[in-house]
Image: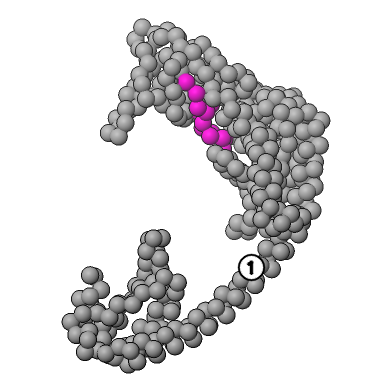
Amino acid sequence: FFAPSMTVSEVPVGALACQQDSFLKELTTRVISCTEVKDKKKKAYEIVLQDTVLFPEGGGQPFDLGCIGDVAVTNVQRRGTQAIHTTSAPLLEGEEVRVAVDWDRRLDHMQQHTGQHLITAVAEAECGFKTECWHMSSQGSSYIQMGAREISAEQLARIEARCNDLILAQTPVTVVVSDDARHDPRIRVADVGLPEDMEGPIRVVDIAGVDQNLCCGTHVQTLGQLQLVKLLHTESNKGSTLVHFVAGERALEQLARSHAHSRAMSKVLNGLAIEKQASLVEGIRNDNTKFTKVNKKYGLELAGYVARDLIAAIQPAEYEGKPFLWHRDDVTPEFLQTIAEGLLKAHPTLVAVLTCGAPKDNDLQFIVSGPAEQVAAVGPK
């Protein structure tokens, strides 16, 4: 990977500039290597830099996007101790370059990731719920899987309130890197849960007085930078519970969407108060179910009368060698089925092609009835 003339060495993952200072947006560094990726669909290059402000995917956090000079970085992955940057254009090995991060994406990831640490810690402290895993989505809500069969609305509200109290207090968030975690007074070994056989430097994210957690990701500097967290809803999952949440700008976006939706519903429902909308819509849905059943019942009765009139009017001899055609825009396939069954019973040798739906809506459906051999011939046509 290294050019023979190079004497610079790269910073390993775990000590990258983005992990030392998650608010660093740009960095001047040097290209260690550039390797073309064998890909028939598109040209791609894997770039290794001396250091980087672009976080490689890990710890449940997606990779950063950004650019190296004028070249866009479309992916960053960890490979061993290296951060591999994927680009669509090559870079010259040994050249000095400026690396910049997509800050909006980075801040969003930090808010969701620190939000997860906070919710996880508070849920265990307040209710004894242990986090089993979590997933950060690219947009909308993320979720934390907790080891509880059920989480009540009251418990959810208590966890959320405590989280937002800590945010309001602007609780500090710091990163501790230690070469000897077991004897480092900054690290609460019991809380971090160090594996017995773990040696060497570790990286711990500390929310003052709340939580310490092994983590490679980028985080905010105080909980105040989360702005707020909102626990949206829960979902059962194989004996555990998924807690869906949003933090920071995503929470504000969720509020804006919900408000816009409520305003639109109020307009449709003639200004009805938000708290009454759900019960009204449920009543409309129940009425619609009843009307649908009644409509289907009388529709099929009507189809029987139509079938009777058609049977009386049809002279089978007129349709030797050609099918009988009948169409209505405003009926259902079940309506056609009733007519087809009546025609087949009364005129077993008649081939009938019955269609429904509006041609302008490209929503036509059809039924072909008659003797099996003739239906097989007419159907494909």
Residue 67: x and y in percent read 47, 21
**Seen from this angle, which residue lies furthest front?**
313
**Seen from this angle, which residue lies furthest left?**
321
The quadrant of the image that shows the N terminus is top left
Residue 43: x and y in percent read 32, 27
Q: Is residue 148 left or right of residue 369?
A: right
- Image quadrant in which you'd find residue 174: top right
- Image quadrant in which you'd find residue 47: top left
Compare residues 141 and 266 and report the one nearer the observer: 266
Q: Is residue 99 left or right of residue 109?
A: left
**Residue 143 appears anywhere in the view:** yes
Residue in view at x 52 percent, y 79 percent: 296
Residue in view at x 55 percent, y 16 percent: 26
Q: Is residue 253 above or below residue 98?
A: below
Residue 212: x and y in percent read 71, 33
Residue 379: x and y in percent read 25, 73
- Segment colored magenta: 55-67
Q: Badge 1, how many Cα within 10 Å: few under 14, some, many 20+?
A: few
Residue in view at x 61 percent, y 71 percent: 288
Identity, as a three-letter code, of the amino acid under mark 1: Arg
Q: Is residue 251 magenta?
A: no
Q: Main secondary structure of the magenta part?
A: loop
The quadrant of the image that shows the C terminus is bottom left
Q: Is residue 34 left or right of residue 29?
A: left
Residue in view at x 71 percent, y 64 percent: 280
What SS does tag 1 mark?
Answer: helix
Mark 1 sits on what residue? 285
**Residue 79 appears anywhere in the view:** no
Compare residues 380 and 30 and report the one nearer the observer: 380
Compare residues 44 and 321 and report the one nearer the observer: 321
